[in-house]
Image (cartoon, rainbow, N blue to C red):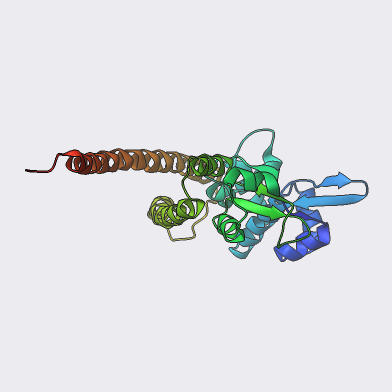
Amino acid sequence: MTEYRIDDLARAAGTTTRNVRGYQDRGLLPRPVRRGRIAIYTDAHLARLKVINDLLKRGFTIRHISDFLSGIQRGDNLAEVLGLEEVMAEPWSTATSTTVAADELKDLLNSGNPAHFQRLIEFGLIEPHGPNTDHPDRYTILDQETVTAYGRLVKLGVPLSGILDVHGRLDRQMATVAETVISAGRRGITEGRSDGWLPRTTAESEWATELLSEMRRAGSISAHNALDRALDRDLARQLNEYLGRARQSSSPPAE
């Protein structure tokens, strides 16, 4: 996670340090972590500032923004709530990550080919670390389950290059599925309203939050189960085809 000092945070958000301190005083922005005399901000602060800036540009007042953010979530941790845009942008993926030495990752995947590692980086599966960008000394595995599963396939003799080819095709096809699901959610929020609508009351905020949560849940379940059914169907089809060819190849030649 990126860390910022207050000047850097304000610059990245397109605002001023005075505004940052003002938002903190009003409870719109979480307090930074202190390291001695230095205040450290994170991507969470930057995301909140971008939400506030966007709402101000749309004509909301600071009071409106405060009510809006407070209506998103009730509880003791209101300072951590980033607003409706943050709810919509909350990651769907629950993949776990871990950091390993470069040699450990090479052993897991049985490959030191830079082209393989570059593809893994482009797919968002790993992230290099270290002063030498050409030969990183460690990597963060961003999707531990997937990379470990690929490692097991490699150990069984499946070429890593072939695995990455399949991953790339699947990634592109999943992008189409994701667009379908997210577009449906967007239409659900804007039904009977203009695109870009934002709630202005507590009741509207609570409704939008609940709707988004339920649509996320329904979309995830539907997509997951649809993929499972498709895998079952195609497995049955290809298994039947494979066994048919096996029977033909094992049949004795006609006399």
Location of residue 234 in the rendering, given as x and y in whole percent from the top left corner: 28, 43
Decide: is 2 above or below 156.
below
Quarter residue 242 falls in: top left
Which residue is at the front of the view, 136 or 113? 113
Which residue is at the front of the view, 107 or 58? 107
- Which residue is depicted at the point 52% across and 41% down? 155
Location of residue 157 in the rendering, given as x and y in whole percent from the top left corner: 47, 44
- Judge from the rendering whether residue 150 lies leftward or rightward of residue 100; answer left or right: left
- Judge from the rendering whether residue 152 lies leftward or rightward of residue 140; answer left or right: left
Q: Residue furthest front?
A: 255
Location of residue 101 in the rendering, given as x and y in whole percent from the top left corner: 72, 46
Asked whether residue 15 appears in the rendered view, the answer is no
- Judge from the rendering whether residue 200 lies leftward or rightward of residue 67; answer left or right: left
Q: Residue furthest left?
A: 255
Q: How many marks?
A: 0
Location of residue 34 in the rendering, given as x and y in whole percent from the top left corner: 86, 45
Q: Residue furthest right?
A: 37
- Which residue is depicted at the point 14% across and 39% down? 252
Decide: is 193 above or below 76.
below
Which residue is at the front of the view, 81 or 136? 136
Quarter of the image containing the C terminus? top left
Decide: is 20 above or below 150.
below
Which residue is at the front of the view, 26 or 15? 15
Q: Residue furthest top?
A: 75
Asked whether residue 54 appears in the rendered view, the answer is yes
- Which residue is depicted at the point 76% across and 65% down? 11
- Judge from the rendering whether residue 66 lies leftward or rightward of residue 6; answer left or right: left
